[in-house]
Image: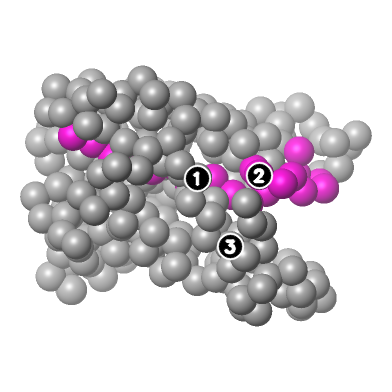
Amino acid sequence: MTLSGRVAFVTGASQGIGQACAVKLATAGATVALAARTKEKLDEVAKEISAAGGKAEVFALDVADEEQIKSVFRSAIAQLGKVDILVNNAGITRDQLVMRMKRADWDSVINTNLTSAYLCIQQVVGSMLKQRWGRIINITSVFGQMGQAGQANYASSKAGLIGLTMAIAREVGSRNITCNAIAPGFIETAMTSALGDEFRQNALKNIPLGRLGTVEDVANAVAFLASDEAAYITGHVLSVNGGMRMG
């Protein structure tokens, strides 16, 4: 499974799942555009990729800012020539029960997690249509499939990504472009480590494989969907959740 000659753009690439996806894509041979708000963290990821013999470029980007998205994608395409693979991974949480949730926290999560994916897709889909090849991969969540108390904004944004994935898959499929989503369950990240041991133990009871997932588990799925081996898969939501939700 090789991605040699491909250019991938990964949002939220400075840590966690995004970082692992970027490293995996680079290992498979892709040149990777690393995008996130904190340039210093991106520089560290780029060094890791370079040390392993891969290629990466850094682009500071706040996906909540539409003009930044447009500007950064123009720069990335000018510098790297194209974007073949887009991984919409950037996301935030602003948890609160719906009766107490501030409108600003609703808007912030929807804009960052969902609207940014639509905007990023717009920046790359034209060139993908012309070259008749492309891979769009949206990182959603098991909670976009089953909901979660205290996360009405987050679950809505992730459910929206699933609908977006299927709509885009239908729009661009005739041009050999696939659009899929990956729905991680509980993954070992800085975000989940802050949930506490009791929460963790309760979560494990609902996972048939008996462990939390790793960022590499998600990255492996991303690399597969980005490859030619997944050419006949589109509009699909791939669950990477250890069996936490089936069907």
Q: Which disc, if any, is residue 145?
A: 2
Element type where label 1 sits in the image: strand
Q: Residue at x 39, y 24 (%)?
A: 170
- Of mark 2 and mark 3, the one earlier in the sequence is 2
Q: Amino acid at mark 3?
A: Asn
Element type where label 3 sits in the image: loop
Distance in Å between CA atoms under marks 1 and 2 = 10 Å
Judge the density around disc 2: few (<14), some (14-19), many (≥20) Cα neighbours within 10 Å.
Answer: some
Quarter of image, res 197: bottom right
Quarter of image, res 241: bottom right
Q: From which residue to which does the magenta span run?
A: 133-152
Relative placement, left or right, of 162 versus 17 is right
Q: Amino acid at mark 2?
A: Gln
Distance in Å between CA atoms under marks 3 and 1 = 12 Å
The answer to whether any part of residue 95 appears in the image is no
Q: Which disc, if any, is residue 241?
A: 3
Distance in Å between CA atoms under marks 2 and 3 = 12 Å
Front-most of 145 and 246? Answer: 246
Q: In the displayed structure, would residue 30 be above or below residue 37?
A: below
- Of mark 1 and mark 2, the one earlier in the sequence is 2
- Residue topped by disc 1: 237
Q: Horizontal and vertical percent for residue 49?
A: 22, 66
Q: Residue at x 76, y 27 (%)?
A: 103
Q: How many marks?
A: 3
